[in-house]
Amino acid sequence: MLSSNPSPMAQRGEIAKAAPFLKWAGGKTRILSKIRPVFPEVYGRYFEPFLGGGAVFFDLRPPAGAQLSDINGELVNVYRCVRDRVEDLIAHLARHRYEKNYYYAVRAQDPATLSPLARASRMIFLNRTCFNGLYRVNRRGQFNVPFGRYTNPVICQQERLRAASLALRQCTIGQLDYATACTSVKPGDFVYFDPPYDPISSTANFTGYAAGGFGRDEQERLSNLFARLAELGAFVALSNSDTPFIRSLYSEFRVTRIEAPRAISRNAAKRRSVYEVLVTSA
Ligand SMILES: C[S@@+](CC[C@H](N)C(=O)[O-])C[C@H]1O[C@@H](n2cnc3c(N)ncnc32)[C@H](O)[C@@H]1O
């Protein structure tokens, strides 16, 4: 176990082990080796405005910290608790148990009535035990993913949470729309966008991360921001699905095609590789 005041060397060792602690649709873990070589080696500040599971942030571990944000308030609260109160969170997670009726009782709780710590603990518990690690809410913003069947799921990944806490220590973490999150970007900064993807087919429209969805008008708004930040002199990178629409939005930038195994699909038989793109400003 890592002590609460580790030496700087021990801290570096622990931070090196940091990795995503949530299952998140569109997580980049499986394609890190393909996108990493395209990223800049030297940059000012790092911005990740569609944080999700944070796979790219944990892989990069920017030495000067990072500006992390997401529109999902439950998710942002989890990151803040992991950063600021990791031992309290670990203790709280120990209260949960993997059992169907208990799952539905926790799912029925209104997060607005809970303390930030209990909310974070509830979110991690649901994420570790729900069907496929999905995050989906109904029109009223209530989490509605069914119970998942696992053999002894690990609800509290203690060491992973502690390593993540150290990696997050230098970071600002906000609940923001991506455009607001980018208002302070300066020349030389690095911005990585991993938005909800443009659907590759009419049945593959998994964009339900947040009430309201992320349609084509949003993809256009994002591409305009991408162009403005590139013009400003930031290094900008973006992942999205490889569709004619996305290629048309980024035709003036460098587009690399990447093969990506997909983990989340309603139908197990459809869980196969798809192609996506990595767009970069330089
Ligand atoms: C594809 S996921 C990010 C995956 C993540 N990079 C990973 O590795 O797990 C997209 C994220 O965008 C967030 N999001 C959706 N609309 C947004 C908006 N307008 N501004 C900021 N974040 C948004 C969702 O809450 C979701 O977490």
Image (cartoon, rainbow, N blue to C red):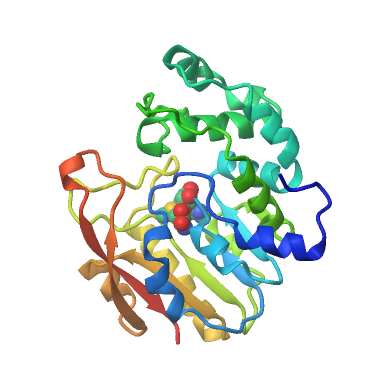
Is residue 29 rendered to the left or right of residue 242? right
Q: Position of residue 170 (x, y in %)?
A: 74, 61
**Which quadrant of the structure image shows residue 161?**
top right
Q: Does residue 218 appear in the picture of this structure?
A: yes
Q: Nearer the viewer, residue 209 or 27?
A: 27
Q: From the image, which quarter does the C terminus lie in?
A: bottom left
Q: Does residue 172 appear in the picture of this structure?
A: no
Q: Name above or below for residue 265 compared with residue 235.
A: above
**Which quadrant of the structure image shows residue 44?**
bottom right
Q: Nearer the viewer, residue 263 or 278?
A: 263
Q: Given the current orientation, which residue lies at the most extreme front position?
A: 1
**Which quadrant of the structure image shows residue 199?**
bottom left
Q: From the image, which quarter does the N terminus lie in?
A: top right
Is residue 195 rendered to the left or right of residue 114? left
| Residue displayed at 47% across by 34% down | 128
Q: How many dots with numbers?
A: 0
| Residue displayed at 31% across by 48% down | 263
Is residue 86 rendered to the left or right of residue 175? right
Q: Name above or below for residue 117 compared with residue 43.
A: above
Q: Position of residue 142 (x, y in %)?
A: 47, 27
Q: Given the current orientation, which residue lies at the most extreme top position?
A: 101
Q: Position of residue 57 (x, y in %)?
A: 56, 63
Q: Position of residue 39 (x, y in %)?
A: 48, 79
Q: Nearer the viewer, residue 189 or 134?
A: 134
| Residue displayed at 57% across by 40% down | 157
